[in-house]
Image (cartoon, rainbow, N blue to C red):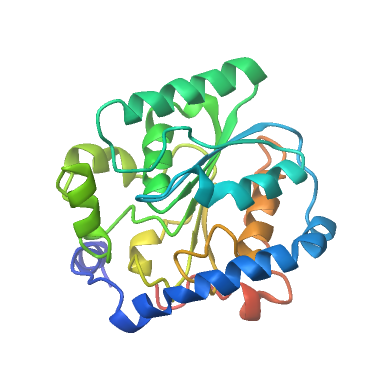
């Protein structure tokens, strides 16, 4: 497949099926599994170095949706923060500036670069921030984020347009979102995502960029034990010493090969 054909194929993507959308109810089970496996995860994952981590929520979600993830990161020794802007109703007036101000505050107060984790639309914001403020950002991790392909290859584009008052087709912003950020970048995605077409979350792999596949719902990504483990593993890498994720012996069961049929 040529690069031009690959681009066309991504632009021609359709949203996940109704069956996958209905299967999003798995998120309750995945959250329960994350809580149940908390003690084991604490034993398996390394402690962090205390650097600040900014966690950005998905569409129509707020900091409550990322509470478990942030508490887990704090238990691993990170200084984890929510975005503090209520529910995420899209890039309305003041939202983007608010994120920039918070990023600068965390960077200045800690004297360290900030890791950013973005769930769904939050990951789109994270990539946009990294394109302009890479000097303050240590790495970017996205969870089921639609940063490429058709803007309507999700089951949430109508919701986005309704709550944001903006078109889902936004080339002005996407020109900052689609290129691989100039910092270590990890895209965590699921082929059984019922909200975002998984191919819209595929990053071009490179010297400091990668994809990690999990078997999860979209709404459960922030609490799924496989995601919690992968996020902690990525954040624990010493600054300037990034290496690709090691799927380990359980890879096919927990972390399938993200490059198959991509």
Query: Which quadrant is the C terminus positioned in?
Result: bottom left
Kindly identify the residue that appears in the image at 67 percent across and 65 percent down.
Answer: 34
Image quarter for residue 7?
bottom left
Residue situated in front as seen by the camera: 143 or 132: 143
Query: Which quadrant is the N terminus positioned in?
Result: bottom left
| 5 sits to left or right of 37 | left
Q: Which x, y percent locates residue 226?
A: 64, 66
Vertical comparison of 25 with 150: above or below: below
Can you see residue 66?
A: yes
Vertical comparison of 74 with 24: above or below: above
Q: Which x, y percent locates residue 75?
A: 76, 45
Residue situated in front as seen by the camera: 192 or 184: 192
Q: Which x, y percent locates residue 194?
A: 37, 72
| 131 sits to left or right of 52 | left
Q: Which x, y percent locates residue 92?
A: 25, 34
| 195 sits to left or right of 143 | left
Residue situated in front as seen by the camera: 10 or 97: 97
Vertical comparison of 81 with 215: above or below: above
Number of numbered discs present?
0
Kindly identify the residue that appears in the image at 50 percent across and 43 percent down.
Answer: 63
Kindly identify the residue that appears in the image at 74 percent across and 33 percent down.
Answer: 50
> Which residue is the extreme one toward the right?
43
Can you see residue 243?
A: no
């Amino acid at each position: 497949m040529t690069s031009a054909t690959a681009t066309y194929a991504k632009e021609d993507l359709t949203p996940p099926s109704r069956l996958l959308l209905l299967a999003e109810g798995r998120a309750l089970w995945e959250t329960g599994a994350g809580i149940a496996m908390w003690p084991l995860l604490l034993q398996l994952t390394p402690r962090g170095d205390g650097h600040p981590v900014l966690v950005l929520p998905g569409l129509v979600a707020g900091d409550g949706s990322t509470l478990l993830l942030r508490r887990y990161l704090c238990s691993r020794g990170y200084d984890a923060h929510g975005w503090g802007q209520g529910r995420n109703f899209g890039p309305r007036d003041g939202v983007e500036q608010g994120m920039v101000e918070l990023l600068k505050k965390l960077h200045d107060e800690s004297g360290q670069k900030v890791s950013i984790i973005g769930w769904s639309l939050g990951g789109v914001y994270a990539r946009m921030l990294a394109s302009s403020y890479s000097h303050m950002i240590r790495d970017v991790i996205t969870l089921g984020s639609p940063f490429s392909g058709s803007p309507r290859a999700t089951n949430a584009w109508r919701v986005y347009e309704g709550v944001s008052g903006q078109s889902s087709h936004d080339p002005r912003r996407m020109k900052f979102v689609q290129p691989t950020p100039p910092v270590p970048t990890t895209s965590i995605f699921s082929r059984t995502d019922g909200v975002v077409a998984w191919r819209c979350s595929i990053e071009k792999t490179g010297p400091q960029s990668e994809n990690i596949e999990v078997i999860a719902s979209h709404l459960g990504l922030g609490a799924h034990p496989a995601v919690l483990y992968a996020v902690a593993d990525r954040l624990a890498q010493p600054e300037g010493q990034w290496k690709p994720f090691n799927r380990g012996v359980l890879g096919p069961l927990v972390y399938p090969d993200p490059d198959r049929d991509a």
